[in-house]
Amino acid sequence: MYKHIFLFVWIASSVFGGWIPIQAQSDSRFTNDATLVANQGQSAILRSSGIHEKKKEAMVAAILSAFDTYFYAGIEGLNENRPLFGNTQTTSQRDYARRILQENRYTLFIGTINEDLVRYEKLPTKGYKAIVQFELKTEALYRDMLRSKVIGKPDERKEAIEIAEEVPQFTMTIVPFKPTGTTYSEALKNNYEIRNAITRISAKLKEKHYEMKDFLAVVDAVERRMQMEQDKTVMSNDKLLISQTQADVYIEVDLGKNIQPNGGVGAANLKAYEVASGNLLSSAQGKSKRYQNYLLADLYDRAIDDCLDEFIKQLTVSWAGKSSKGNQFVISFSIAPESAIDFSTEVGSMGFPLSDILQMWIKKHAMNGRYHLAGSIDESMQFDQVQIAAGAELEFVQQLYLYMRDELNINTNRRQSGNTFYITIL
């Protein structure tokens, strides 16, 4: 049967005279084998074991062992399999864990214990091992840690307004979905619904205090100058249109409808991309209810409302992650035809091949050492995933340029296109 933890604590205190405080992490009575049985959202059912010289106190040790595991090692299925504190703890985190483990504060976060599943093993040496299944109030523990300021709120749990206060705000523009081989101008031409949807989304985001750039105004201005008719490179024109808005993010909106005798349904598909890199930041789909009497614009408006808040939350979280995770860039090296060296040439004071020297530099200076070498031959070398701190991209490439010029005595040409830096060795 199930009993609340306070009942057990009362029994342990009155019958066995209380329990001996157990030290975190280093105590051999903590097995750190806690596993998740079921995640119930606000709480979790855990199974863990603990060792103590007294049988009933082995049960307490098992529960405390689960807390210790959650704090320092992590439990698969909770907190993205990561420990709450990790290997490097602050003084406040260590003090918090001490109070939980040694001052009975853990009882605040225990729900029920399934005593029918409690198992005891008599150890060959003196003592007992208890295996316990119990309920941990994970949401209450999380909120207590937040109030105690021993953890910070992760981006995915913040409201969009909270993230906006912490992260430099980005600007957005709204563009229509366009089939391959067509232009934005063609997608907008004689399409009242898509123009209306772009205007409405922009207005809704302005109400949420986001800075919007007017894509439709840019398109109209370009068409008036006849640039799109004169330049036949469709893709370069479309990229030019987005860049001329000077927005950080562009949101692509695609509309659909289902019209039947019993009424109509509107659908909207939203996708957000970073202008600089082209990386997808957010996507969502929404639809309206079916209405017998309707205006098509109203159906689309309801479909947008159905998904806009979650879409913006996802976008804002993705953008906030740039501050802690950086941006991913491609660095492509090549050898000019007239160059006297290639990537096998030994350079620098260490006399290593140029390819090795560049790889060591990228590894040292990439954010958290995160990079991936896609390939290297004598004439070219490409890193397709180099993590660079947000806002430090130009500084990163400038430092690389100075290193090659001053330390390796190598001259280069360099240029940037989107999220790719091209460096040519002269």
Image: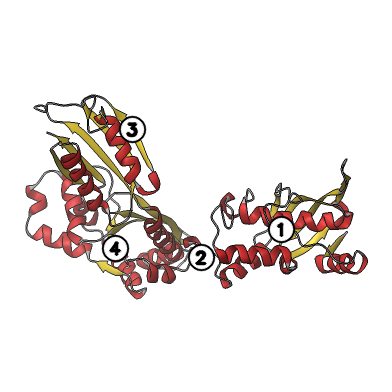
Q: Mark 4 or mark 3: which is in front?
A: 3
Q: Which quarter of the rendered picture does the N terminus lie within?
A: bottom right
Q: Earlier in the sequence, mark 3 or mark 1?
A: 1
- Say whether residue 235 is visible: no
> x, y percentage for residue 12?
87, 64
- Residue at mark 2: 152
> x, y percentage for residue 38?
70, 52
- Residue at mark 3: 374
Front-most of 302 and 316? 316
Q: Residue at x 32, y 46 (%)?
A: 365
Residue 193's place in the image compared with 87, above or below, is below
Kind of residue sitting beneath label 2: Gly
Instruction: Check disc 2 and report its element: helix, strand or loop.
Output: loop
Q: Are marks 1 and 4 in contact (CB under 8 Å)?
A: no
Kind of residue sitting beneath label 4: Met
Q: Disc 2 and disc 4: Cα gap in Å?
A: 28 Å
- Residue at mark 1: 23
Q: Earlier in the sequence, mark 2 or mark 4?
A: 2
Q: Disc 4 and disc 3: Cα gap in Å?
A: 32 Å
Q: Is residue 162 left or right of residue 2?
A: left
Q: Mark 2 or mark 3: which is in front?
A: 2
- Residue at mark 4: 172
Q: Residue at x 40, y 48 (%)?
A: 368
Q: Residue at x 38, y 63 (%)?
A: 300
Q: Disc 1 and disc 2: Cα gap in Å?
A: 25 Å
Instruction: Check disc 1 and report its element: helix, strand or loop.
Output: loop
